Amino acid sequence: MTTAGFEISRNTQVTISDVTNPILKNAQAILQRDISKTTFAGKEQNEICLVLDHDTASQSERYYFNLKEGKVTIKSTSSIGVMYGVLAVSRSVLGIDDFWYWMDTPVDRKESILWTNFNLNLPKYKTKYRGWFINDELLLMKWEDHDSNSYVWQRAFETALRVGCNVIIPGTDLTSHKNRQTASEYGLIIAQHHAEPLGAAMFARKYPNLTASYIKYPNLFRQLWKDAILAQQGLKVVYSLGFRGQGDKPFWEDDDSREWTKKAISRVINQIIKEQYEMVKKYDPDAPMAINIYGELTGLYRDGLLELPDDVIEIWADSGYGKMVSRRQGIDNPRVPILNVPNPHHRQRGLYCHAGFHDLQASNFLGLMSNSPAFVSSELCKARQNNMDTIELVNTGNIKPHILHLREYAKSWREDYQERSLTEILSEYVETYYSESRGRLVQYYKQYWENVVQYGEYEDETAGDEFAPFLIRRIIQAWVTPNGKLTDAGWLVNEGSLSADLKKIKAMVEPSLPGWAALIRNLEILLLEMKDQHNRNVLYGDLYMSAINQSAGLHALVNLIKAYETTQEAHEKDDLIYAFLQADNAVRMMNKILVVIKNNPSPKWRDFYENDADNDVPLTVKKLKFLRQYLRNLGDTADEDDWERRFVKLPGDARVMTLWTTHREMSDAKLADKLREILIDKL
């Protein structure tokens, strides 16, 4: 290995040894782009050549550098190894951050860059298969950059490789099918959603008029599986075996062909796994296979009812909130520990864990995970101690809101990883992405997790940004419909009446509100004080938006509950004015999330959150406005002019009836403003 230098400039050309290899071509494009981003002068022409070594049977991910006669060669026995070598140069020589695209990390441009350290090595990884699952990717599905959605996905695959991934589930359902060829052309091994065995098309989409029953239509299912394997020939794949159903739920919920006992369920699953296993062995014999012990399979496994081939990798899932216990499914929350499950067959084991999560109820979709990265670090180290490190698939959500945790997951794949404290994690993160106010920022990030609401009895059962909008919509429906009960909320409350349920929720949430309000104030002050626009952009898009989703949502939730309580306690119609104003407060708070998104100081990310169909903040605002109008209907006249006449108009004007009215009724929002001004002392 030489210590001589190599000068990288705008005249440095990146070449490849095989122009037909798409992975080398993508690696070439990345390195040439990064050279153009980091240098602005043309020096002596020279060359960096990317070489795939075909002379050895080894498919090592390691890469090597060689400088000879003014030419650098980046060589590996695998295409992904060459890609890793290119990204090592980008990171360590050119100074490009792994998350440059998502954090808009500034580049220190120079005339040229002298490369002297050729002893760059692939990290020593403990985890063999290291992957991202880009899941619940609603924001990525609709968003475009450079007028291209494909460009966005290419940057996602590049980022995955930068942090050390060699495996990817490139989206959910049709998105995954669309993206798997491109992901493969970046060097990534394709894996599959636990609800999409073998990467097959959904039965219900292929046969919309048939019941999705393996019992009734086994040959149709077999054909879908075979088609999926053949469609992925030529790609590197970790095949997922198993059978859940149409969508991410148990198959027996859609199959009424019999009474589904545990033994009946396991017989079907075991038969399907056997057939899928043999099918993969026939058409792609060297491909690794895995099965997700997820959701309902956890209990079947514990009961000894699953029959799995011994060379299949078992993938065990965290709770969705980083805890190494089985996931809560509605009110079913057995919290089966996954770390001490006996392994008599000595199968390889791995993890499916979450940085982003969508459980339809209380998890994080638009912002930071509700449990800290230090909590996740501790849980990952426990998993490693139990040899659950053959594969690790990390649910990334839409990537951008979850970078803090994604960085920690990537570090955990290395041999030398040890549990890290929150201060250590945050200090490193802030040092990487901010150039000012670092001490304050560490404290403000900490305050985020200090304020998070704990909704369950266990420390990890904490509320993400989905919690408030989910509950708000259900409270409104329960309030104005004859049923009068919260739907889908038995996991949180079951006090017997809506009033009792809301009292419990209010007691759970209200103590956190001063802390959230203080954090928002601190962040808004810091945003005004920061001197550097890039720092403001990062803080706004990273912590401030996460905190706003939590703070504004929870404030809206409590205001809604107060409106309900005021209505229940009202003795006369005028008492409903206060419920109306509390509902208006809820509208204002929830709408603040939309205002913050719209006013993002970074134009690039201003429309990123538009397809917010999980939290669905716009729908939540709409329903709160409906409730505000509903309360006005209850308390005001049919013409909606009595509150205005008695509380807003001057007494003399209110009494003169020459003209019954001189203008249309005030809007709900304007009336609320006026009433709040008049009644301020009574609120």
Image (tube, rainbow, N blue to C red):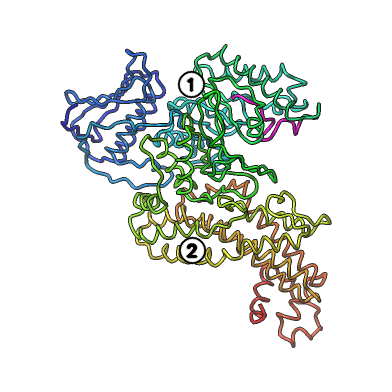
For the residue carrying disc 1, how many other residues have a C-alpha within 10 Å: few (<14), some (14-19), or many (20+)? Answer: some
17 sits left or right of 290 in the view:
left
**Residue receiving disc 1:** 236
Report which quarter residue 251 is drawn in: top right
Q: Quadrant of the N terminus?
A: top left
Which of these two is toward me, 513 or 175? 513
Alpha carbons under labels 1 and 2: distance apart: 47 Å
Q: Residue at x 48, y 30 (%)?
A: 391
Q: What's the magenta region?
A: 241-254
Q: Please state the horizontal and vertical placement of residue 556, each as a whole percent of the image.
A: 63, 62
Q: Quadrant of the C terminus?
A: bottom right
Badge 1 amino acid: Lys
SS at mark 1?
loop
- Is residue 251 shown in magenta? yes
Badge 2 amino acid: Leu
Q: Please state the horizontal and vertical placement of residue 282, each as a whole percent of the image.
A: 57, 11
Which of these two is toward me, 174 or 136? 136
241 sits left or right of 56 in the view:
right
SS at mark 2?
helix
Query: Which label is found at residue 519?
Result: 2
Above or below residue 241? Residue 609 is below
Report which quarter residue 64 is drawn in: top left
Q: Please state the horizontal and vertical placement of residue 393, each as a whole percent of the image.
A: 50, 34
Q: Please state the horizontal and vertical placement of residue 446, each as a whole percent of the image.
A: 45, 57
> Answer yes or no: do the residues labelled 1 and 2 have beta carbons within 8 Å?
no
Q: Residue at x 76, y 79 (%)?
A: 645
For the residue carrying disc 2, how many other residues have a C-alpha within 10 Å: few (<14), some (14-19), or many (20+)? Answer: many
Residue lying at the far bottom of the rendered structure = 652
